[in-house]
Image (spheres, rainbow, N blue to C red):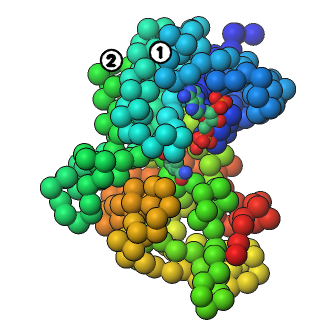
Amino acid sequence: MAEKKIIAVTGATGAQGGGLVRAILQDASGGFAARAITRDVNSDKAKALAQLGAEVVAADIDDVESLKRAFGGAYGAYCVTFFWAHFSPEKELAEAKAMAEAARYVGLRHVIWSSLEDTRRWVPLSDSRMPTLMGKYKVPHFDAKGEANQAFTALNLPVTILLTSFYWDNFIHFGMGPKTGPDGRLAITFPMGDKKLPGIAAEDIGRCAYGIFKRSRDFAGKTVGIAGEHLTGAQLAAGFSRALGQEVRYQDVPPEVYRGFGFPGAEDLGNMFQFKRDFEEYFCGARSIATSRSLNPALQTFAHWLDQNKGRIPTG
Ligand SMILES: NC(=O)c1ccc[n+]([C@@H]2O[C@H](COP(=O)([O-])OP(=O)(O)OC[C@H]3O[C@@H](n4cnc5c(N)ncnc54)[C@H](OP(=O)(O)O)[C@@H]3O)[C@@H](O)[C@H]2O)c1
């Protein structure tokens, strides 16, 4: 049998990378092997991946030499940064550059860069519709990822720029689930008006990425956007009402109110939702559900994801 193509996966113990490692391992005859990258090969999550059959190696995306070692001998790499671990767009940019440099150094045949839009292309810093944050960004956790595309393309890497979507898992882990309002009723709150929010089960991002690696020839050099569904706040709320068996309302708030909620990242997310609301046609258009399903035939709908996860969603 031909030797398996190794995919080196950053963030392997997390949402995106974990989905990819599991997708590779679940397809034993697919011709790929998973190399899970972690800073701590002895963590429970790392050991669980080893148990599933992944090769587990240590590297830190802040350390280019460790990345060169971790990428060595691989066919491809999945590259992702972790904004919410440090809140620094400059750090994300430097990490993307390190991953691109390591990919070039070892001569990878296909790289997926988990990116998002540089919203400043649509909303320049001079545009007063939304405040400029951290001195030179509109949506810091988007803008640096978009800016970092260049780190990969400038090195002529065979890169697929992957535009991901809002994880529905944020309803579990990011404090965005239904909350009881002063009227005693449950509501989800977004500044999206009646516009559609592309969303996805986080696990499906890795599964789509696996579909991209399987079709390298079609997707190297391309930008691909993925989503499970495009749903309005009202449709998300209706999904919750059905799954939870009690009414959940959608509460629309102006972006400036959302920016003022005061939790870490509220301004960034307020601007992000405003961008998605004001550029709905572009943003949804860039994330084709049909393409996502062709990459990942098991792509979940919101209803399906809710049925699997409703017991894990904190409400109250
Ligand atoms: N939440 C959303 O809706 C959403 C939507 C689109 C895009 N995103 C983006 O997704 C990115 C995060 O991806 P994720 O959700 O898959 O992350 P995650 O689940 O938080 O996983 C992070 C993993 O990355 C590893 N890690 C952290 N710092 C590292 C470093 N310096 N070097 C090597 N590994 C490191 C950690 O593993 P070890 O501890 O094992 O090293 C951790 O398990 C963010 O940049 C965010 O902007 C999020």
Dot 1 amino acid type: Val
Left or right of 136: which side holds 15?
right
Point out which mark residue 11 bears. Answer: none
Point out which mark residue 64 bears. Answer: 1
Dot 2 amino acid type: Leu
Q: Is residue 43 above or below residue 192?
A: above
Q: Residue at x 49, y 56 (%)?
A: 264
| Disc 1 crowd, CA 10 A, few/some/many (<14, 14-19, 20+) | many
To which residue does mark 2 refer? Answer: 155
Q: Residue at x 42, y 34 (%)?
A: 92
x, y percent for residue 45 = 76, 33
State which tag comes first along the sequence, 1 or 2.
1
Foreground mark, 1 or 2, reads 1
Q: Is residue 71 above or below residue 299?
A: above
x, y percent for residue 249 = 59, 83
Left or right of 309: which side holds 289?
left
Instruction: Judge by depth and name the residue closer to the eye, 250 or 163.
Output: 250
Q: Residue at x 43, y 20 (%)?
A: 98
